[in-house]
Image (cartoon, helix red, strand yellow):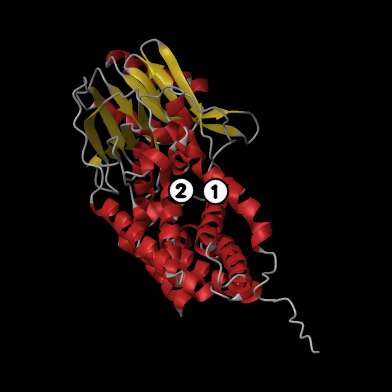
Amino acid sequence: MLVVVSGLVGAAAFLPLGWWPLILLAWPLWLVALRGAGWRHGRYLGLVQGIVFYGVGLSWMDSIFQQAAWGLWLILALFSWLIGGIIGEVSARHSRASWLAVYAALVASAVEFVRSELFWLRFPWQTNGLGLGPTWLSPWIGVYGAGFLVLLAGGLLVSGRKFQAFGGAALTLALLALGCFRPPQVTETTPPIPALAVQSESCDFYAYHEMTVVRPFSKGIILWPEYAASFDIQSNPKAFGMAFNLARERDATLIFGTEKDLGGDSHYNQALTLDASGIVGSHYKNHPVPFMSDGVKGRLALPATTRFGKIGTPICFDCDFTECVRRMTAAGAEAFAVPSMDAARWPARQHLQHAEIFRHRALENNRWMLVCATSGLTQLIDPHGNRIAQLPMLKDGWLETTLFLRSDTTFFTRAGWLFPWAVCALALITTPFALRKSNALNPPPQHKFEP
């Protein structure tokens, strides 16, 4: 019952409900259930928690993958299965250990990071840090660092030791305060860059071109969605000429999604940047979406050098992960223009959950970010992760706004991104010792001497 409730309240922390304080309750409930469960029963409890947590929170997968969604939920739940088994076994061996809460947070955080960023089927949704939302922690230790603190607070709270419980309560209150008093909206004094984002589900190059031509916009950045040209535009002289002429006539920088043909059935998913001088930037998607015809994995993450400054152009799923936006920022990106795609046939709750992730990337790296999606959510995000402007979902339209450049970098961009790697290293180092049999469970024999 505890692990089922844990899965339900954890899922409720994410949109569309978005009851974020519940993310602070999910782990303590689960940890109480795991205490002393052992390897076998701990795995069962973890599997149940994972199926409920991911099955409810990511229920929209059923609309996209049909029966295969059950397989995806099960794969995600296997990471909860592993967490449950390890913590169940270690807590059975060391039920009175003072370090148990810290170790449990290390293991759960490390497995979450591996599941999200390192596993071959990487899917960084529904992490504890995302559940907490954008806070002042993000520019320092990022979303995974915030998630570790969520786990640590819950573990200390139910540790059974008075001193640790006070510490857990204090940390929980601090996290609640960070959630209630989030970074304020940014007011810039630097010169603005006009920007126009065109949202349409048509996925047709000529439709995007026509929608842009009818707008009296010039001398700025024009952004179209991912796969706005669902073909290799550089091998199509007519379409490429139209895009180039649009950029030249409007004295604008045009950024849009297209393909780079590699021969056969292979291609790169490309973000192309054009201005009056021609191609000034090209980015190949670093994180193609699994199980979809999303191209070959790109390796580089560099900004495009435009007349307005260095603009990062990660593509959609690239921004779900911490490293692509961070690498572009470290390489000099001063703002971001992101072509994205969330199909209209996908449920609205998928669009909403995806849109939240961009806020974390903007805050982690202290950068303005304009996201242009096919059917939403097209949005402008400030360097504090606040959504400044947006278009209604599932409707064609234009978002005319302004971008600003920033050159300073956060601690996260410079070094804080290493936090989850340090957590993984500590979890690996400490686990062999944690799995050693406790002397407390097998006390040495008492010898009785008689005269």
Q: Residues within 10 Å of mark 1 (few under 14, many from 20)?
A: many
Where does the image place residue 340, in percent across and percent down from the top left? 40, 39
**CA separation in Å, label 1 and label 2:** 10 Å
Q: Count neighbours of disc 2 (C-alpha within 10 A) and say few if under 14, some if 14 to 19, many if 20 or more.
A: many
* Front label number (1 vs 2): 1
Residue under numbered circle 2: 144
Indicate left or right for 384 with 4 as reference.
left
Is there any visible trace of residue 172 in the rendered image? yes
Amino acid type at circle 1 is Val
Numbered circle sitting on residue 423: 1
Element under label 2?
A: helix
* Residue 16: mark in rendering: none
Q: In the displayed image of the protein, which residue is found farthest to the right?
A: 451
Seen from the viewer's position, the closer of residues 398 and 105 is: 105
Q: Nearer the viewer, residue 40 or 391?
A: 40
Whether residue 314 is visible here, answered yes or no, is no
- Residue type for callout 2: Tyr
Identify the residue at image location x=70%, y=69%. Answer: 437
Q: Is residue 157 left or right of residue 66?
A: left
Residue 341 versus residue 187 in the image, above or below: below
